[in-house]
């Protein structure tokens, strides 16, 4: 399985920007999709953005036009550039990697806190 380490979270004022990184290590072959999820207090974990190995991208409606997901396959790293942040973006952000190993296998990072103050 893949080990994922997120970084880049923090406290920012509304309207500000942050860039999250997710570095993958370990058994990293056959990673198909890398994604960012988030979970706010009292809410379910939700998909923020996902990018496939072929470069197809999907965003949650709430972040379209503000967030950009990217992936550096040579570095086994995914990024989430977050601009125009809003207080409602406050959550723990988790990196996810999906591998095709006979069946789909999901790995998760430990999460990084993003807090947006109004």
Image (cartoon, rainbow, N blue to C red):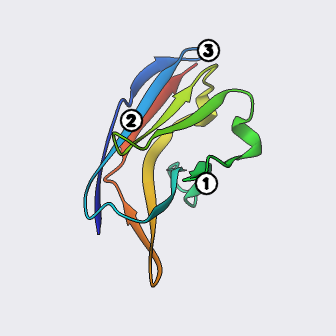
Rendered position, 115 above or below 118: below
Q: Is 85 left or right of 8, judged from the image as shown? A: right
Residue 20 is marked as none
Q: Nearer the viewer, mark 3 or mark 2?
A: 2
Q: Which is nearer the N-term, disc 3 or disc 2? A: 3
Q: Pick whichever of labels 3 and 1 is earlier in the sequence.
A: 3
Q: Residues within 10 Å of mark 3 (few under 14, many from 20)?
A: some
For discs 2 and 1, the disc positioned in front in the rendered view: 2
- The quarter of the image holding the N terminus is bottom left
Report whether 63 appears left or right of 48.
right
**Residue to which mark 2 is pinned:** 21
Q: Is residue 56 above or below residue 1?
A: above
Query: How far apart are labels 3 and 2 at the CA level?
Result: 20 Å
In the image shown, does 101 or 78 lie closer to the viewer? Answer: 101
**What residue sits right under mark 1 in the picture?**
47
Residue drawn at the location 45% of the way across and 57% of the way down: 96
Label 3 residue SS: loop
Q: Check disc 3 and report the residue beneath it.
A: 15
Which residue is located at x 52 percent, y 52 percent?
Answer: 35
């Amino acid at each position: 399985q893949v080990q994922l380490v997120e970084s880049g979270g923090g406290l920012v004022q509304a309207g500000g920007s942050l860039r999250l990184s997710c570095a993958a290590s370990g058994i990293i072959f056959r990673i198909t999709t890398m994604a960012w999820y988030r979970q706010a207090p009292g809410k379910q974990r939700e998909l923020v953005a996902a990018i496939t190995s072929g470069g197809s991208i999907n965003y949650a409606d709430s972040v379209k036009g503000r967030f950009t997901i990217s992936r550096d396959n040579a570095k086994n790293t995914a990024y989430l550039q977050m601009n125009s942040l809003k207080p409602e973006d406050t959550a723990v952000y988790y990196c996810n990697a999906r591998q095709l190993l006979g069946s789909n296998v999901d790995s998760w990072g430990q999460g990084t806190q993003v807090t947006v103050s109004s």
